[in-house]
Amino acid sequence: MSGVKIERYYLGCLAHASYMVGSGGVAAVIDPQRDVDLYIEAAAKLGWKIEHVIESHLHADFVSGHHELAERTGAKIYIGAQADVLFDHVAVRDGDAIRFGDCEMSFLETPGHTLESVCVLMKDLSEPTKPGVLFTGDTLFAGDVGRPDLSPSHTPQELAGILYDSLHAKVMTLPDETEIYPAHGAGSLCGRQLSSESSSTIGRQKQTNYALLARSKEEFVSLLTDQMPTRPEYFARDVDMNRRGAVALSELPVLEAYRAEQVIELQSKGALVVDTRPSMEFAVAHVPGSVHIALTGQYASWAARILGLDRKLILLAEDEEHVRESQLRLARVGVENVAGYLKDGVIGWIRDGKVLEYIPQLSAQEFQELRAKEPVRVLDVREAGEREAGSIEGSQWIPLGELEARMGEISKDGLLVVHCKGGYRSSIATSLLRRGGFEDIANLIGGYDAWKIA
């Protein structure tokens, strides 16, 4: 069959999009996630041979599967010439191209998000009049552009200026009908205002993307760097793992099942229990000292931001299947120091005669009734943009990513009610606060959204 086919793979936990492009029985994979079986299995079903693996840049928010995918398929890895990687690769520059079947993929060097960033312009040679498709990596998103603070050698302002030049000299000069396929969607840490759209066009972004609407380079730099969110510490570590090429997931150790006494002993030596169950299950009964990060949300990125990559972890999940899923998601962001899991979860803890803790939950109505009777302190753990759109009067504001470092700013006198937008992050926050010695706390069910409705 002639022509070119594009397959998109979206990993909601990391708001990460990867792509496989096939033509003439050959395929190229762009920005693969760490667990690469899905590409190998999909290619086999489609009758494609993966011969090319393309990295738009050295990713900071997740560990890429480029190294394992190349080893298992014999494919070549293509990455920008400034990447300085430690594995076999093809260093690409402006004008370099790959051709297979009816597919032509041309590289554009577009530094700014990172110095080695590239975009890939794909043309279907069987339809020469059809507009091209641009795989933009983290250079241009639907609704945003890549954050410019990932270089150890350039300031964010310098990188933002470089990104402005890349966008205006190369990306925005393409026809307005050119479709864009970015590496991330809404919720990614690589930008602030990403849309939930899976794709867009150059023309639509010129009309709607706040960064592209900047009237000058100076305004663009200011928009990107003023009040920029703090860069998560694990970003530099993930870049280093991607520069070296991560080990295959099959090489990660099999997790050990621990009884309660063993968990307590490991806790005494610094290990941390991570409870991945739904928020209400954690609230009702959890292991003392545990941190709650529900598997249902952006589990991996929050785990990496809050726990780092080095702490020894013990998982607590609903069952062994969820334990395995938790370990996989952690590995996707480079968290590999997982010692084991609590055998039979909370039931095993109870069976071994150990004490559980709970954290009170308040509905929006209960919260309102309580505030009418007595003073209640409120902690808002949302991000700056959410806070600017509205807040509960008198609330204290500390974004979740900064909470552990800033706990000293919070008084322990009286009830503290914690909220985020919908309840996911505030549950994490209450577990951190309880672990930090805050006894009189409660989580606002449904968060700010529920309060606003009430």
Image (cartoon, helix red, strand yellow):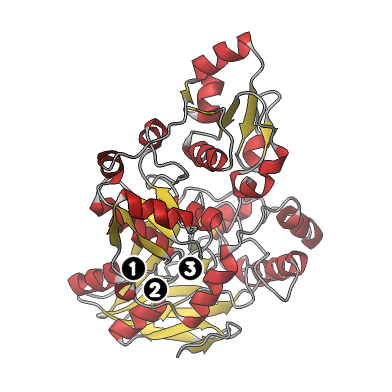
Residue type at numbered disc 2: Gly
Mark 1 or mark 3: name the one nearer the start of the chain: 1
Residue at 58 percent across and 82 percent down: it is 83
Query: Which residue corresponds to mark 3?
Result: 135
Left or right of 169, for residue 49? left
- Quadrant of the rendered structure where residue 69 is? bottom left
Residue at 37 percent across and 53 percent down: it is 263
Query: Which residue corresponds to mark 1?
Result: 35
List the single residue furthest toward the top.
373
- Quadrant of the rendered structure where residue 258 is? bottom left
Left or right of 403, for residue 263? left
Residue type at numbered disc 1: Asp
Q: Secondary structure at mark 2?
A: loop
Disc 1 crowd rating (10 Å Cα; few below 14, some 14-19, many 20+) is many
x then y, percent, for residue 295 = 38, 47
- Do the residues under discs 1 and 3 have CB atoms within 8 angstroms? no
